[in-house]
Image: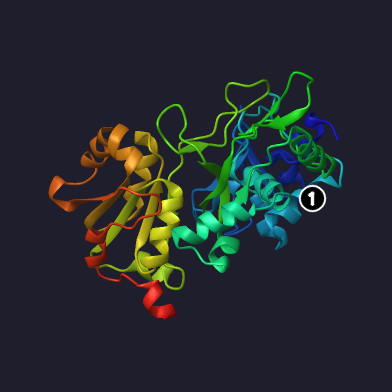
Amino acid sequence: MKQQEILEKTSIINVKNKLNLKETFSTKDTIFVKCPFCSDNGAMKLNTTENSYICKNCGAKGYAIGLYAKNKYMTNRRAYESLLQEDADLSNNLKTAIITSTRKNDEELDIIYQSFLENLDLKSEHIMELLRYGFSMEDIERIGFKSIPIQEKDRINICNKLIKDDFDLEGTPGFFKDRKFRWNFKAHKGILIPIKENHRIIALRIHLEDIYNTDTTDIWFSSSQDCNGSKTLNNIMFLYPEENAIQFMNDTGTKDIIIVSEMILAYKIHLYFRNNIVIGVPNVISKKELQKLKRIQKVNDVHVVMDKHTVLHNSENLLENLYKLYPRRKIKLHFSLKDGEIPSSIENLNNYIDIQENIA
């Protein structure tokens, strides 16, 4: 299936028509329709440039595939497959053509990355490394750690399998076309870490076996400098209390949060602080991403755990941005000077769970 055909079938216009959403007004790249969730006429705005939707009345928002999935009561992946099975209907009152962005949206990335990870294995030496870090086999499987294939033929075969399954790799960070115009991805020796938001995989981080040339062991699965490649965003990751996340977020009392530089350490600390919000951040972070921290209201103390590479090279970048969000007196610093180490200073925080004692 050609790329343009896939784009048309997964466009917000095709989804609008497949769901028979009543079009009330349109201009340039925007279509207003009757909201299928709250039934308010003209309250839902469809943006054909971003392939997104938002209702000004009930607040429902997301992207084309998710809109179709919610209305058909199915998963995003099943919605994607269903949309590809039928011809696209692009009838509308717009006079402009459909515009698409280079990087795929989060819903599309989630579908592709999930299928990509399903085609990968986890090497025994990486399993042993994760076990040494303190993860259990159940943790490793639940989080979804995977190893990157080193052999070129294996990487090409995985890309071909994804394409055969009707996944379009254009605009997917990490994938690119090589000199023979084949879809490929780089053979970094390391562990792939899923970066999630609202249970969707929106990016992949790589924990390298060896230190990278920028003095870090963690880099993004990206392809911004390659042919037909795409740049990933410097995403941060929220890890919420698993059983009482909604109650926790609605709690009117003050709360401590834990910000961890690097994702594999954030996953590790979340195992020990299951009743706290743990936020994983990359070693270089943008101001735009840090603005997401404002969604957590009434913060008491901000515990910042830095891995050794952030301490040596990027601590100023992280702290400078945090000081713009929180008073300095609220920020408590902790340092992890060994891979996977939880600083003893943070163990005094409430809700710490000693996993080893529980096992014993």
Q: Secondary structure at mark 1?
A: helix
Q: Label 1 sits on what residue type?
A: Glu
Q: Nearer the viewer, residue 64 or 201?
A: 201
Taking the spot 28% from the left edge, 39% from the top edge, the residue there is 311
Q: Nearer the viewer, residue 65 or 154?
A: 154
Q: Is residue 211 left or right of residue 79?
A: left
Residue 168 position, x and y percent, is: 75, 36
Q: Residues within 10 Å of mark 1 (few under 14, many from 20)?
A: some
Judge whether 6 appears above or below 201 on screen.
above
Q: Quadrant of residue 33?
A: top right
Q: Quadrant of residue 179?
A: top right
Taking the spot 60% from the left edge, 58% from the top edge, the residue there is 39
Residue 198 position, x and y percent, is: 52, 55
Taking the spot 25% from the left edge, 54% from the top edge, the residue there is 303
Q: Which residue is mark 1?
A: 81
Judge whether 263 appears above or below 178 on screen.
below
Identify the coloring: rainbow
Identify the image quadrant of the C terminus: bottom left
Please identify the residue farthest to the left as the structure is shown.
329
Judge whether 296 appears above or below 16 on screen.
below
Residue 30 position, x and y percent, is: 60, 34
Q: Is residue 82 left or right of residue 77?
A: right
Residue 316 position, x and y percent, is: 25, 33
Q: Nearer the viewer, residue 50 or 318?
A: 318
